[in-house]
Amino acid sequence: MILNTGNRTDIPAFYSAWFYNRIRAGDVMVRNPYYPQQVIRYRLSPEVVDCLAFCTKNPAPMLDRLAEISIFKQFWFVTITPYGRDIEPHVPDKVQVIESFKRLSEAVGIRAVGWRYDPIFISEQYPMEFHLESFEQMAASLSGYTDQAVISFIDLYKKTRRNFNGVQAVTAAERIQIGQTFAAIAGKNKMTLRTCCEGTELEPYGVDCSGCMTKAVLERAIGVSLKVPKNRHNSRTGCDCLLGSDIGVYNTCGHGCRYCYANHDDQTVKYNMKNHDPSSPFLIGNAMSEDVIKEAKQVSYLDRQLSLFL
């Protein structure tokens, strides 16, 4: 199975001590986000976890202890965008994040770490020219440390519209100009440009539109073929990524990004973060008397008859 940590929150940035505690304990408890009394217990063992998948804006808190998860195969996405504190109030300086990215790549390998430049939006402060220049500068800095870059355009969820007043969708003409230019820049820096749930609009311009965390992407990262049941793929239309089994919790990410889909509001996030206990098997809070705990059905997807990219 693939164990995800980053679809609901940023565990490496804010909860790395808790995560390493769970690795030592060998299990983690996860509440159903819609039915909180329903709890799933996941075993944290390489016997049943084929890959630990991370998505973070700041891997630095994890870096000094990576040896503790070296027994696991891993895949990391690090999001680095050019936005300022007005959009990403609590994301570390991007120069620091790039340096952390390089350290991470050196530790886990170039195929096991990807760069995300998303979400993309166009505004008076962040016009098209700004994105084209920023992407080129960042790609040059990351050249040799990753061979893949992922982009997506801002999705106007209800939460996003509420927390990011005045944001507008990116037009088709803008998407094509970005895709075409970014693909050329990525190629120059020996990267494949991929999109995340954006359809096939940019395929004619050399963009891989098959997805960002697909079976093929993960197989290449971990060097082993996977036999994944069809029902384990993401159910979103146009997305074939393996995004299930997430151990994070919504409304717990402290970055405060205005475009965030996972946070409802700042007060809820602050309340939840205050209820974080690094020693708890739960990311937020602890066990409650009414909890109904079920063991996750964890089955390895590894095809032990075939290894890739040897």
Image (cartoon, rainbow, N blue to C red):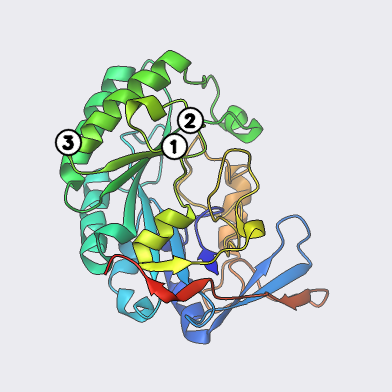
Which residue is nearer to you in this view: 268 or 77?
A: 77
- Res 78 label: none
Q: Give residue 188's quadrant in the image.
A: top left
**Is the residue 81 above or below the residue 51 in the image?**
above
Give the labeled residue for mark 1. 209
Residue at coordinates 73% horizontally, 70% vertically from top-left?
39
- Res 188 label: 3
Quarter containing the C terminus: bottom left
Quarter containing the N terminus: bottom right
Furthest toward the front, the residue is 305
Callouts 1 and 2 close, C-beta under 8 Å? yes
- Disc 3 is placed on an element classified as helix
| Amino acid type, residue under disc 1 in the picture | Cys
Where's residue 69, x and y in %?
38, 77
As drawn, is 7 to the left or to the right of 142?
A: right
Give the labeled residue for mark 2. 200
